Image (spheres, rainbow, N blue to C red):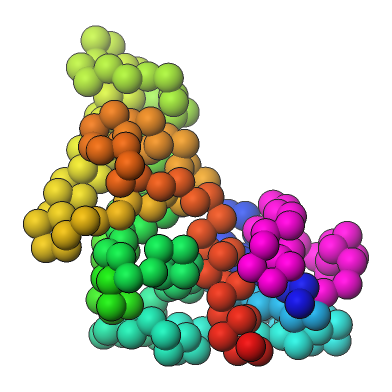
Amino acid sequence: MVNLVIDIGNTFTKAAIFNNRKLIETVVFKELNTDDLDQFGHFDNSILSSVEQDSSQLEAHLKSRSACIRFRTDMYPSVINHYKTPQTLGLDRFAGVIGAAALYPEQNSLVIDAGTCITYDLIDKNRNYYGGCISPGLSMRFQAMHELTEKLPLIAPDLHFMEKIGTDTRSSLLAGAQQGLINEALGFINDYELRFEALQIILCGGDFKFFDTRLKNSIFAHSVKVEPHLVLIGLNEVIHQQYE
């Protein structure tokens, strides 16, 4: 079966076509309109995950063309969701742990989703999900330092900057935001490794490249997997559980 998966996030909308569980195509939109769906051709099923409350027009269009699911955090019983307020749980966070469980079954996995915010979510080898952490994303850190102070300039992240000590204002901002973020991630990883054996680290999100080399240089490379489309894979799993 051919499935269309749509994830509307805070900044971008990601769409993907799957043939069963094989990822065929992904497209990123700044804003998705119903006319944009024509480029995907025929699809049997679709799933819509959206941080926006009003996606009714897009949802209606999908229902006119396919068997459509509006993703919720209570619709995938294969993952045992222990989150105390599931109604406030980010859809992308839950889809990410569903994807982790699908790709790495019976394994303890920590999903690091590096987007507008950075989320750390743990699913254990028995498919228990308890929650995780939400932290400011890479660009958000630079924006906050600029907007909440009088004199600090707004600078862009620099993926090539590796120094841990800044020697001027720009390099001090880079060292603080970027190395601080890596130290944060390593701290969370170390905490989880004390509780969950053979922990698998999975990177996804728009800023995954920032973490990739830095984390692999800091911890065992075999324990870090890069899955840029993990959230989309998780949403596709929901379709399969619904219709198989």
Q: Is residue 169 left or right of residue 226?
A: left
Q: Is residue 111 left or right of residue 206?
A: left
Estimate the x, y position of residue 185 in percent, counting from the top left.
25, 45
Residue 46 lies within the magenta run: no
Most extreme residue toward the left is: 194
220 or 231: nearer the viewer: 220
Estimate the x, y position of residue 60 in percent, counting from the top left.
79, 85
Most extreme residue toward the top is: 167
Estimate the x, y position of residue 9 in percent, counting from the top left.
56, 62
| Residue 181 visible in image | yes
- Asked if residue 64 is positioned above or below residue 41 in the image, the reply reads below
147 or 241: nearer the viewer: 241
Q: How many marks?
A: 0
154 or 135: nearer the viewer: 135
Residue 23 lies within the magenta run: yes
Quadrant in the picture for the N terminus? bottom right
Chain part drawn in magenta: 14-43
Which quadrant would residue 229 be assigned to in this image? bottom right
Please tell me which residue is depicted at 41% across the width and 47% down the height of the picture.
Answer: 225
Please tell me which residue is depicted at 16% across the width and 63% down the height of the picture.
Answer: 196
| Residue 119 visible in image | no
Please tell me which residue is depicted at 88% across the width and 72% down the height of the picture.
Answer: 42
Please tell me which residue is depicted at 28% across the width and 78% down the height of the picture.
Answer: 126
- Asked if residue 137 is positioned above or below residue 71 in the image, the reply reads above
Estimate the x, y position of residue 164 in percent, counting from the top left.
22, 20
Quadrant in the picture for the C terminus? bottom right
